[in-house]
Image (spheres, rainbow, N blue to C red):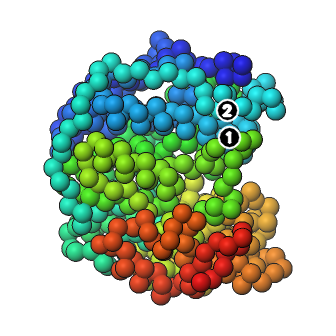
Amino acid sequence: MFIDNIISFNSIEVSVLSIEKRRIIGDIKYDDNHFKLIFTFKEDITADKNIAGLIVTMPVINFTYFSRRLVLNYPLSKTDLNLIKNFVVINAREVFINKIINRRYDFIKEEYIPKDNDITEENACGITEVTASQIIDDKSYDEMDQNNVLIMSSGGKESLLGYGIFNEINANGKNYAFFFEESGAHWLTAKTAFDYYEKNFKNVIKTWSNVDRFYHEMLRHIKILRQDMINIKADDYPIQVFIFPIYIFLTLPLILKYKIGNIIMGDEFDDPREMGKFHGIEYYYGIFDQTSYFNEMMSEYLRNKGINTRVYSIVYPITGSLEEKILIGRYHDLYLNQRSCHSCHEKNGLIYPCGKCSKCLGILLFIEANGGNPKEILYSDDDIRLLERRVLRAKMRLDPDELKYTETKLGFINGNPNDYGHVNGIHILPYEKTMFSLVPENFRDNIINIINKYSDGTYTLKNGTWVKT
C-alpha cells in the first residue's frame, strides 16, 4: 500500500524535559534521533506537564503522517487524546492531498507521487497509532472574562484589522496582542507591527521558539522529499500544514493567567463553492486551521477541558479585499505597519516586502483596487509597475471571484467588477441564518456597524450564485 512506502519513522515520541518560569523545553525522539524543542515567554507563566506537553506536541503533528506511531509521554485527558487523534487524521489528509498530490512545487521525489489507484481514503488518513503514557481527568479552571480578548497577531491585514476593531469597541486594557517569534526569517514579517505595538499599546505579548529549526530537521528525515529543494525560497512549506494549533496551545498559559475568554483568529472568507471533496475524500485545501470548522473544534475542546474560552474570527464572512479597504480607510496607522509577505528582507533598519511572492501580489491587488498607496508600506515603483505582468503569470492563491474582481477593477482583464460584487460585501454562509453568527453577541453589533460602513451590502448563496439581500 502507498502509505507503507512513505513511512519515514517507526515512532515519534514527545516528552516534557522541563517547565521553568519563562520557558518550556520538550524532547522529540524520532527513532534514534532527538530534538530539544524550546518555547520561551517574555513573562512568568505557570504550566503543568499536561499543558506543556500539549504545546510541545502541536509542531510534531505536521510530521505524524510519516510515522507508524506517535507516543505521548506526559499526562493527557481523554479530551486531549481525542483531539490529537482527530488532528493526526485531518493533518494526514491535508498532507496527502495538498502537499503530495496537488503540490505547488517539486518537493516530492517522482517515485513517491501517488498513482490514481493510490488515491484512497486509507492512504489519505494514514496508519499512525497514537498512544499516551498516562490518562488523567480534566481539571476545573477559573472562569474566563468574556470581555478579555487575545488577537493572534502577525503583521498581516487580518490581525491588524482585528486589533484595530477591538481597540475601538472594547474597554481599555481588555485587549491582548499575541506574537509568535519563530527562529528564522519568518519573524521579519511580524516585527514591524510588533515594534509599533510595543511602543503604542499595552498587553503586547511575544513568545519565541526554535520550531523553525525543528521543522528543518524533520524535513531532512522525510524520505519522499527532495533534499535539494527543501531550502528553496517558496511561498509554501514542503510538508507543514498544521501551524495555528501551535499558536493556540502556546497561548494557554497566558489565557489562564489573564482569564481571557476570546481568541481571535484571522481566517477570512473562503468561497464554499470552491470547497469540495477530492476523489470523495474530505479535505480543507491545506487551510483546515484557518476555517470555522477548526475554530469550532477548538472552542468545543477548550470547553470540554474546562476552559471557557472561545476561538473565532471576526473576518470570516468578508474577503481580503474588503479587509484591506477597511484597514486603509479606518485604521491607517495600523495599515502602515502591514507586512504580508513570505520573504521580507531588512535594509537600513526597515523591513521591506519582496513584492513578488503570491502573498505580496494579492496584497498589491487589494491596495490598488481600493485606492490605497502601496508605497506607504514600502512596496517599490517596480512592484507597482510590474504588478499586472506578475499577477497574470503567477499561480495566485485567491478565490476566483476575488481575483477577477480586483483584476477587472484594475483593468488587467476584460470584464465588469460588478459581476463579482459580493467580493465587497458581507456573506451569510450556508450554515448561517444571520450575518456574523459565529461572533459572540457582546461584540457582534459593534463589529457589524463598522464593517457595514465599508461593505456593499449582504449576500447569500442561492442556486450557486451570491445574491444581494
Report if the CB atoms under discs 1 and 2 are less than 8 Å apart: yes
In this image, 199 relative to 94: left or right? left
From the top left corner, tell me how far across and down residue 371 is, in percent.
60, 85
Which numbered dot is residue 147?
none
Between 180 and 252, the one nearer to me in the picture? 252
Say what secondary structure mark 1 lies in.
Answer: loop
Give the labeled residue for mark 1: 281
In the depicted structure, whether residue 229 falls above or below residue 147: above
Three-letter code, disc 1: Ile
- The quarter of the displayed image where residue 458 is located: bottom right
Q: Give the x, y percent position of residue 266.
A: 46, 61
Relative to 426, is 179 on the left or the right? Answer: left
Mark with earlier residue (1, 2): 2
Q: Give the farthest residue toward the top.
A: 32
Which of the pair 337/93 is nearer the observer?
A: 93
Which residue shows up at 37% across the image and 79% down it? 445
Mark 2 sits on what residue? 121
**Residue drawn at (30%, 78%), measured in percent from left and top?**
169
Return the residue nearer the eye: 27 or 196.
27
- How many angstroms separate mark 1 from mark 2 (CA)? 6 Å
In the figure, is residue 38 to the left or right of 129? left
